[in-house]
């Protein structure tokens, strides 16, 4: 009988002890870093290989769920929407041979790719959209990254209301993946403000938070350590992995 | 059955006999696995909380929702299973937020890592301990295969008739267990199912959730019915593993708890007159 009480209490302690012990360890910076150490291994083993599955027209979610934030609240963005994005420029600069500011019209006149791919949100849900736009690789060819460029940083026309600008980054291998596109259209219509108008990134080989919306600048850098909190993206600065293939 | 050493010595002088039952790799991987399992469940529930529903489909589809945990209004938690809604306030849906108060949250803070809602950190724990669990599994399989002890554990077709006799023995409908080696046929069935079917399935369904792996090996996601379906199987696999864990702990508790614990810590197992009975 004693043994059973001992056993029951030890199982109870094991069950309820797991969360407080885990929470205490989670708040320890060294332990937290150790937990994050497998990211490199996952990146090495999975990486950006193969092609994301493409779906049929019938599979498309006509009311594609809005991920992350909805329409940016600031006045400059509202003016841009009101002006039909005529004032919009996609600036490509940094470590490139030919920096350039693309108008929306220029992007629309480049070869367009259409993909019906699944957006896998880090939260666990998925939705299928039909995306059309310019292959990021074509933009890279147009501006020609210099030898020192290792990453493209995507600066966005949005912030979280607390002064943190929204941004993301990919390495050049991920940027050149044939399905990595700067999408201009979703489900046969120009992107609406909630879905990242006028230009959003689509990276179907990684989780949805990599697919930054309202992209306005591609900055080519050797390292992203000096940008914002230095983890390579808005969500990365909040603790999410930079490599979001898993 | 608890075993009395003194009595045995007076009636059977050759007993008790102690054998070296568990190799150090088995013991270390067993306890690491136990820790990893606890962490994977707690951090997995943390991750689940970010989208507290399961769909039998590829993309999310409310029409094919199998399970949904929700808080329809302040102070109310509900759980909907196959279209039937139950009020689960305090347990599921409206629960402890891990910071001393209550909130709309699927699984309560006392069972998640970290206790408060934090998807990014839940993922860190989950992905790290997934490697620990997989590493233990591989180390155990390789060392057991090299030593030949794997053969004692894996269920063979010839064990199947004995499994029923063993069940009758457990139900006290048969006096003697059937003749068996280190592990009885029911143990072999359980270990084979958990070690070679369930554990790999939980790993594979977890991998199927990764968009990067889906791009390399999309048949993996397809065979499970798509990404949301894989998430459902991953959750179901966890429930089955918890079920196995409960039975396993019950067996250890009722078949000489201290002897079993001692064996899994030091490796030395004290035999009773029924050679090999144990969980």
Image: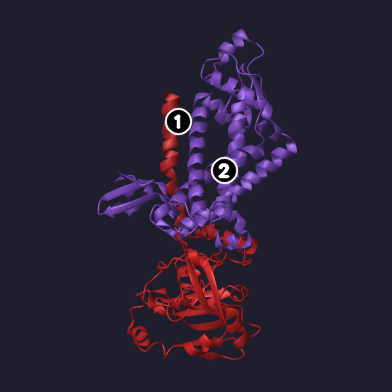
Chain colours: A red, B purple
The residue that appears at 61% across and 76% down in the rendered structure is A176
Q: Quadrant of the C terminus of chain B?
A: top right
Given residues B126 and B235, the one toward you in this image is: B235
The residue that appears at 44% across and 53% down in the rendered structure is B55
User: Please, is residue A84 above or below residue A31 in the view?
Assistant: below
Given residues B134 and A194, the one toward you in this image is: A194
Label 1: which secondary element: helix
Q: How many marks?
A: 2
Please tell me if label 2 and label 1 are on a single chain. Answer: no
Query: Residue B269 placed where, x, y %?
Result: 62, 26
| Res A43 quadrant in image | bottom right
In the image: residue B65, left or right of residue B275:
left
Q: Are marks 2 and 1 in contact (CB under 8 Å)?
A: no
Instruction: Report the mark closest to the observer, 2 or 1.
Output: 2
Q: Which chain is disc 1 placed on?
A: A
Query: Residue B128 placed where, x, y %?
Result: 55, 54
Q: Which chain is disc 2 placed on?
A: B
The residue to which callout 1 is attached is A7
| Res B183 quadrant in image | top right
Label 2: which secondary element: helix
Disc 2 to disc 1, C-alpha distance: 19 Å
| Res A149 quadrant in image | bottom right
Res B182 seen here: no
Query: Residue A234 placed where, x, y %?
Result: 45, 72
Res A141 seen here: yes
User: Please, is residue A83 above or below residue B4 in the view?
Assistant: below
Q: Residue furthest front?
A: A58
Label 2: few (<14), some or many (≥20) within 10 Å?
many
The residue to which callout 2 is attached is B33
């Amino acid at each position: 009988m004693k043994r059973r009480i001992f056993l029951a209490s030890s199982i109870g302690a094991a069950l309820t002890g797991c969360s407080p012990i885990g929470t205490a360890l989670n708040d320890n910076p060294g332990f937290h870093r150790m937990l994050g150490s497998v990211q490199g291994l996952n990146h090495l083993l999975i990486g950006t290989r193969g092609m994301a599955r493409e779906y049929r027209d019938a599979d498309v979610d006509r009311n594609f769920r809005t991920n992350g934030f909805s329409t940016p609240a600031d006045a400059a963005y509202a003016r841009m929407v009101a002006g039909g994005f005529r004032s919009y420029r996609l600036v490509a600069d940094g470590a490139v041979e030919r920096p350039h500011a693309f108008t929306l019209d220029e992007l629309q006149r480049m070869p367009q790719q259409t993909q019906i791919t699944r957006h896998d949100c880090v939260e666990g849900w998925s939705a299928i959209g039909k995306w059309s736009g310019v292959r990021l690789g074509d933009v890279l060819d147009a501006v020609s990254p210099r030898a020192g460029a290792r990453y493209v940083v995507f600066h966005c026309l949005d912030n979280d209301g607390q002064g943190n600008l929204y941004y993301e980054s990919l390495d050049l291998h991920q940027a050149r993946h044939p399905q990595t596109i700067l999408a201009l259209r979703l489900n046969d219509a120009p992107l609406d403000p909630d879905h990242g108008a006028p230009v959003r990134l689509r990276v179907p080989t990684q989780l949805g938070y990599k697919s930054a919306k309202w992209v306005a600048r591609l900055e080519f850098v050797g390292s992203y350590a000096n940008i914002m909190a230095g983890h390579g993206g808005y969500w990365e600065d909040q603790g999410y992995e930079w490599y979001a293939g898993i | 059955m608890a075993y009395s050493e003194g009595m045995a010595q007076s009636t059977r002088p050759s007993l008790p006999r102690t054998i070296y039952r568990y190799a150090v790799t088995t013991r270390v991987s067993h306890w690491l696995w136990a820790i990893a399992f606890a962490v994977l469940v707690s951090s997995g529930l943390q991750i689940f909380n970010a989208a507290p529903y399961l769909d039998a489909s590829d993309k999310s589809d409310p029409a094919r929702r199998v399970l949904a945990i929700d808080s329809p209004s302040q102070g109310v938690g509900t759980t909907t299973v196959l279209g039937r809604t139950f009020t689960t306030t305090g347990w599921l849906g409206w629960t402890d937020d891990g910071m001393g108060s209550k909130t709309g949250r699927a699984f309560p803070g006392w069972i998640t890592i970290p206790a408060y809602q934090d998807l990014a950190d839940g993922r860190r724990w989950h992905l790290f301990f997934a490697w620990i669990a997989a590493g233990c599994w591989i180390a155990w399989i390789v060392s057991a295969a090299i030593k030949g002890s794997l053969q004692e554990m894996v269920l063979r077709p010839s064990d199947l008739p004995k499994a029923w006799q063993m069940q009758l023995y457990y139900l006290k409908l048969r006096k003697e267990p059937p003749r068996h080696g280190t592990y009885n046929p029911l143990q072999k069935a359980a270990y084979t199912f958990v070690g070679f079917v369930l554990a790999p399935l939980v790993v594979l369904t977890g991998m199927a959730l990764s968009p990067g792996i889906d791009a390399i090996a999309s048949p993996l996601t397809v065979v499970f019915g798509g990404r949301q379906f894989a998430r459902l199987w991953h959750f179901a696999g966890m429930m089955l593993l918890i079920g196995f864990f409960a039975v396993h702990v019950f067996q250890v508790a009722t078949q000489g708890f201290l002897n079993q614990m001692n064996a899994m810590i030091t490796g030395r197992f004290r035999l009773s007159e029924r050679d090999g009975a144990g969980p």
